[in-house]
Amino acid sequence: MTVAKTIVWFRQDLRIHDNPALLSAVDAGDILPIYILDDVNSGDWSMGEASRLWLHQSLASLNESLNGQLCLFHGDAQTVLIDLVAEFDATAVHWNRCYEPWRIGRDKKIKTQLSEQGIEVNSYNGSLLWEPWEITKKDGTPYKVYSPFFKRGCLAAANRIRHVLPAPKNINYLALPQGFALRSLEELSLTPSIAWDDGIRKAWSVGEDAAHDRLQRLIDRRLEGYKKGRDFPAMDSTSRLSPHLHFGELSPHQVWFQVLQSDPINEEDLSHYQSELGWREFSYYLLYHWPQIPDQPFVPKYKAFPWRSDKEGLQQWQQGKTGYPIVDAGMRELWQTGYMHNRVRMIVGSFLVKNQLIHWQHGERWFWNCLVDADLASNSAGWQWVAGCGADASPYFRIFNPLLQSEKFDPEGEYLLRYLPELKGLPKKYRHKPWEAPSDVLDQAGIELGKDYPVPILDLKVTRERALSSLRTMNDQLAAEQ
Ligand SMILES: Cc1cc2nc3c(=O)[nH]c(=O)nc-3n(C[C@H](O)[C@H](O)[C@H](O)COP(=O)(O)OP(=O)(O)OC[C@H]3O[C@@H](n4cnc5c(N)ncnc54)[C@H](O)[C@@H]3O)c2cc1C
């Protein structure tokens, strides 16, 4: 009997447990596990630098789990696969589905070409609890509002979530034919162009085992205090699973079921955690049904919004030099660790698009490059939510006051000091607003504003009024055109 020669194409599922494509391929016969870094088809959304750093380590970890048999390629996935199938005489290709518009388009073409050649192509759901096309309103159209999407759509179909799969017991590997353009991990050029990655390396453990350890920490805590604590950036209340979920070192299925079995101290913490996983599903759902959201406002009228061009202001924001400590701490957390707490993402986002009146796509781009959890679905949805132009977004006129947010969610200024140690000599109340500290207090703290820490780059009240007036101008203009 001839054994099926199956290629398993790893993508955003860098794990061996609960991996439907891997398990089915191993059941079918001998496998060739591959990863293709496809910078050809990703267009404007090729992987950012922090993500590449993560990917490097994650592939190393997956390779170890696969006994060093993972084959790496760099280039157009279609060309690589078609050549590989021909050379290798493969009979089938298995992969888990991805949902980015460029990947959907590319995968469809690959599937058609391989099928025409008589190659079996099998794709599976490896990274979403609910397939986006399975959840619709009664009239068959997609939901645009989160709450009914999650409650009426997803939770009502909770019994359809597939169960967690085991890792394959015995994997038989096939050797790659000679002369293939195989890349070593080093040759994938995944290290950043400038040396800023030390903090990221220190802040994270990468790979499937590390992802499980992190989930276990949440389970051991029995989700205690999640609902309330998740808004306080100095507390270690959230799971920090986002990069692991993005790269598929862990599936949402594993998280969902383990959390359900975690004997939570409080039911509210459990349901709140599930609803955050629901926001991840909603983001993918939006991206699937409205594939333009990374580049276009979901609410079209915002195309006419009068954004400002402000190169210097954008740089001050990116570098954490706005003079507003909560904004600067967030931006420095991002730069130093590749991550930013969710509450702070909302605060820095609001500051950029409302106080600075800079287009949300500049923020989206910066996050894309700097976040280790950069995810086309969640990042686009997050930025559109902040900018008021997304599906079920926070209305544009609701403008966060960064000072009040800072005092409310970091009352001791602990988070601020973690990233702005230069403020440590200030009494608590001035850590949020150094510009209000009397000169003798500043002297005592060894701070000269404008030298040791920036003077605020803008006036919150004035810029709030400017944002509201820009919104009115846009609405009036659109009304006049009708
Ligand atoms: C402007 C902006 C940009 C964002 N960009 C991204 C991004 O590129 N990648 C990303 O994964 N998340 C993004 N988010 C969502 C959110 O900030 C992160 O998912 C969260 O901070 C991750 O931390 P955690 O794993 O500790 O979350 P937890 O609170 O532990 O939540 C558990 C999981 O639920 C999911 N989740 C939680 N909140 C959200 C949310 N609002 N939207 C979508 N999924 C969510 C994540 O997968 C997360 O790991 C963004 C939010 C904003 C406001």
Image (spheres, helix red, strand yellow):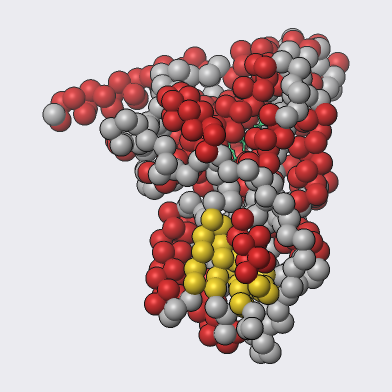
Q: Residue at x 78, y 14 (%)?
A: 412
Which residue reaches farthest front? Answer: 1
Q: Residue at x 37, y 35 (%)?
A: 136
- Left or right of 40? Residue 268 is right
Q: Residue 90 at x, y = what percent? A: 57, 80
Residue 236, located in which quarter of the rendered image? top right
Which residue reaches farthest bottom? Answer: 178
Q: Residue 7 at x, y = what percent? A: 61, 72
Residue 57 visible within the image: yes
Q: Is residue 215 above or below residue 458?
A: below
Q: Is residue 84 above or below residue 363?
A: below
- Counting every numbered tag in the picture gives 0
Which residue reaches farthest left? Answer: 482
- Left or right of 14? Residue 400 is left
Q: Residue 280 at x, y = what percent? A: 55, 37
Q: Is residue 99 above or below residue 343?
A: below
- Left or right of 308? Residue 431 is right
Q: Residue at x 37, y 47 (%)?
A: 292
Q: Residue at x 71, y 15 (%)?
A: 266
The N terminus, quarter of image: bottom right
Picture quadrant of ligand 1? top right
The C terminus, quarter of image: top left
Q: Nearer the viewer, residue 252 or 402?
A: 252
Q: Nearer the viewer, residue 100 or 170?
A: 170
Residue 213, located in which quarter of the rendered image? top right
Q: Nearer the viewer, residue 169 or 116?
A: 169
Q: Residue 137 at x, y = what percent? A: 34, 31
Residue 307 visible within the image: no
